[in-house]
Image (cartoon, rainbow, N blue to C red):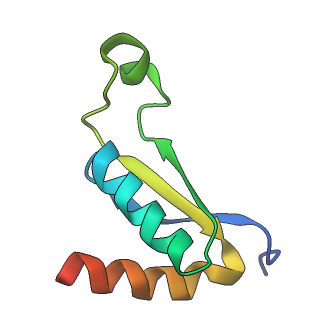
Amino acid sequence: MKLNPNEPVNVFMARDRIEADMLIEILENEGIAAYKKGIDGGVMNVYSGNANVGDYIFVDSADAEKALEIIEAYTLS
């Protein structure tokens, strides 16, 4: 099955909201639109204001390979 180039795909699971926000900013500075979605579906954010279970990072499928390279460079440094 071939993905639509504009189809969002999960490229990374950040450890927490802070890491997700940092990675999204890095991706956007490289011209890649990205967004996050909490693993818990937002329930923890509603009750505690901060999910400690991580966030998925999504990008367009056309940008997935470049996004993975950028994230890998960041996480290995």
The one of 41 and 29 positioned closer to us in this rendering: 29
Residue at 64%, 67% in the rendered image: 33
Q: Quick one: 63 or 3, which is closer to the camera?
A: 63
Viewer-closest of 30 and 3: 30
Q: Position of residue 35 (x, y in %)?
A: 57, 54
Which residue is farthest front? 29
Q: Is residue 41 left or right of residue 5?
A: left
Q: Does residue 1 appear anywhere in the picture?
A: no
Is any part of residue 67 visible from this angle?
Answer: yes
Looking at the image, is 21 positioned above or below residue 7? above
Residue drawn 83% across the image and 74% down it: 4
Residue occupying image coordinates x 32% and y 82%: 72
Q: Is residue 27 above or below residue 41?
A: below
List x then y, in percent, for residue 19. Answer: 29, 55
**Residue 7: x and y, percent?**
76, 66
- Quarter of the picture containing the N terminus is bottom right
Q: Position of residue 43 (x, y in %)?
A: 44, 20
Q: Residue furthest top?
A: 47
For the point 57% across and 60% down, which residue is it?
Answer: 58
* Number of numbered tags placed on the structure image: 0
Nearer to us in this view, 32 or 53: 32
Please tell me whether residue 58 is drawn above or below residue 42 in the rendered image. below
Quadrant housing the C terminus: bottom left
- Residue 3 lies in quadrant: bottom right
The answer to whether residue 27 is left or right of residue 48 is right
